[in-house]
Amino acid sequence: MRRRRFLTTAALGGATIVGASALGGLDADAAFAAEPSLDPAIAKSSFVEGRITGITGSVLEVAGSSGGHARVQMTNVTSVWKVRPTTAEVIEVGDGLYARGVPMPDGTVAADAVWVNIVNLDTTIRGIAKNRVHLAHGQHEVVGNILTDTGASYAGRGLTSDLSRLRIGQSAQVLGAWRPSDDSVDVVRISVGH
């Protein structure tokens, strides 16, 4: 997947073209970045979060967690993440999302990046099985599905596929994607000793 993409918006007849990377990174970690540095040519970016309540063509209707409503315009160059880089066809009504993009005059946000069902959880490891890890997040129990490409980071070191050093009782940060169907989480990365 190319790291630099361009966002074009039909809302302005293709008149606006900005480098998507000018709004910030496109990987899963970028969804939780404190404040991306903006290209001076871009007045501001917008961030939308919530549950998808409807999909009409390439527009996502989003109910925000604080009660607001937003419309997110997908384009043919919107970067989509749902466990891994993918396409807009995997987005479904009921999914949660974070979207970053450029505000349009009609209030719609033309998205350069959309992260579907992404979660970043501070947890405690409660159990370890071959294909899953049982986690506590506050007062909630969460099942983490271990994928073939799940990575682990120990004490801030680089990612490894070796999960053998995970221990019950460890505090762990989990980056992954929530599965609305069974309320579990597909674990992309689990970090301990951070």
Image (tube, rainbow, N blue to C red):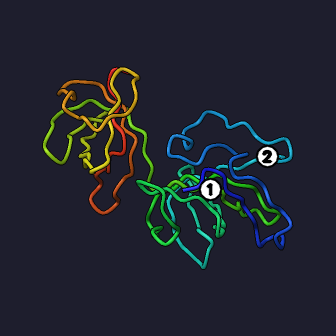
Spatial separation of the CA atoms under disc 2 and disc 1: 20 Å
Type of residue at label 1? Gly
Which image quarter is the N terminus in?
bottom right
Foreground residue among 54 and 193: 193
Which is more foreground, mark 2 or mark 1?
2
Residue 160: where, in percent of width, then height? 32, 34
Question: What's the residue at 33%, 24% (across, down)?
Answer: 154
Above or below, 188 relative to 57: above
Which element is circle 2 on? Answer: loop
- Residue 13: image quadrant is bottom right
Question: What's the residue at 53%, 72% (across, down)?
Answer: 54
- Residue 74: image quadrant is bottom right
The disc placed on residue 68 is 1
Crowding at dot 2, Cα within 10 Å, few <14 / some 14-19 / many 20+, comes out as few
Residue 56: where, in percent of width, then height? 59, 78
The residue that disc 2 covers is 44
Foreground residue among 132 and 22: 22
First in residue order: circle 2 vs circle 1: 2
